[in-house]
Structure formats: C-alpha cells, structure tokens
Amino acid sequence: MNEPQKTSLDDQLTEFYGSIELPPSTVSEMLADRDRPRSATRRLMMIVGAAAAVVLALLGVFLLGEKDATELAMAEVAKNHLKGIAPEAVSSDYAVVQEHLSLLTFSIEPPAEGLVSGFELVGGRYCKVQGEFAAQLKLRPKHGGPAATAYVVPADGPLTAIEDSSAVIDGVRVRCERTDGRLVFLAEHVSAE
C-alpha cells in the first residue's frame, strides 16, 4: 500500500505561494511607487499639520487645565461621598484618627473656623483624591442633620491648580477650601426643600 508522502505545513505553503506570480504590470507599479520621490510640498504640509495639532493640544491643556482639575476632583469627592463608606477609625478626636492614618504626612485636622466649623468628627479612613492620598473624614452636624464627608489632601501634584470653589454634583454640594498647603473638600447631601 502506498502511503501519501507527509510534508510539513511550511513546505506546503512555500510550494503553493512559490507557484503564484504577480502580473508584471502590478510589479512595475509597485516598484515605481516605491522609487517615486515625495514632493516637498507634501512633506511641508505634514510638518505644518503636526505642528498645528501640537499647538492646539497645548492650548487646550493650558486653557482648560485648571477648570478640569477642579471639576474632576470635585466630581470624585461627590462620588466618594455618595458611596457612604464607613470610617476605619471611629473617634471624635482628630489625634486618634491621625494616629490610625499614620501613613499620611500632613495634618488631617481642618481649620476650626473653615468649612467644617459646624460639624464634629465621627471618624476617618484613607482615601485618594485624583490619585493623591487623602484623609476621608465622616462628620456629623453639631445641630442635627445628615452626615457630611470632609476630604483633606495636600495641595500639590495634580491638585496644585485647584482653588476655593463650590458646586452641586449629583445632589451633593461640594465645597473646596485651600488652607495651609492643603485642600479641604466638604461634601453634603443637598436638601430637597
């Protein structure tokens, strides 16, 4: 019995494609296109187009950068507030919560006369605002009402351009205050009055 001769797939592919030829006119067109010099005008247009794209991108970053950083940070604060995550360290004493959040190299206690003046501390946990480590502080209003969340973060890195601001995002009033090289964000549910 004659068995068919076994050849590798590589051998079969080489044999198949080796037997196919492009028409001479196609080969000539491909070689002519390869050897054709590119016009100086076309090269210049490509360089001008690339330069214009870079200028527009830089201009957009320059004009929108500060606004975008503030909006992004405040939207993140509102989103985190809505999650309602419980504090890891439960205490009304900032020193106790600071000790629990020992990896933070800045004071987590907001100024008494600032955004949190009408609140008392319930506890805190680690958090991030725009990729920067922050303290997330659960607060209770001194005169009753729903809990609020404060975020304390150094005003450096991507947060350098953020200034005092206020906005309502997804039913959460977010206010931001710059103080002592830190940013303090306060997030509260907007009452449905």
Image (cartoon, grey):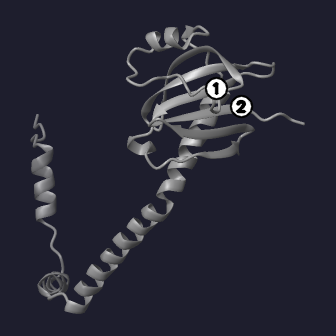
Is residue 135 left or right of 175 when viewed as pictured? left
Is residue 168 left or right of 159 when viewed as pictured? right
Residue extending farthest front: 113
Disc 2 crowd rating (10 Å Cα; few below 14, some 14-19, many 20+) is many
Q: Determine the CA span between mark 2 and mark 1.
A: 7 Å
Is residue 86 left or right of 15 when viewed as pictured? right
As helix, strand or loop, the secondary structure at mark 2 comes to strand
Reply above or below: 170 against 140.
below
Reply above or below: 168 against 137.
below
Disc 1 target residue: 149
> As rendered, which of 170 and 117 lies closer to the eye?
117
Position of residue 176 measured from the top left corner of the image (x, y, whole percent): 59, 40
Disc 2 target residue: 188
Residue extending farthest right: 193
Say if mark 2 contacts mark 1, CB within 8 Å.
yes
Position of residue 133 measured from the top left corner of the image (x, y, whole percent): 43, 28
The kind of residue tagged 1 is Thr
Q: Quadrant of residue 193?
A: top right
- The residue positioned 46% from the left and 10% from the top of the image is 100
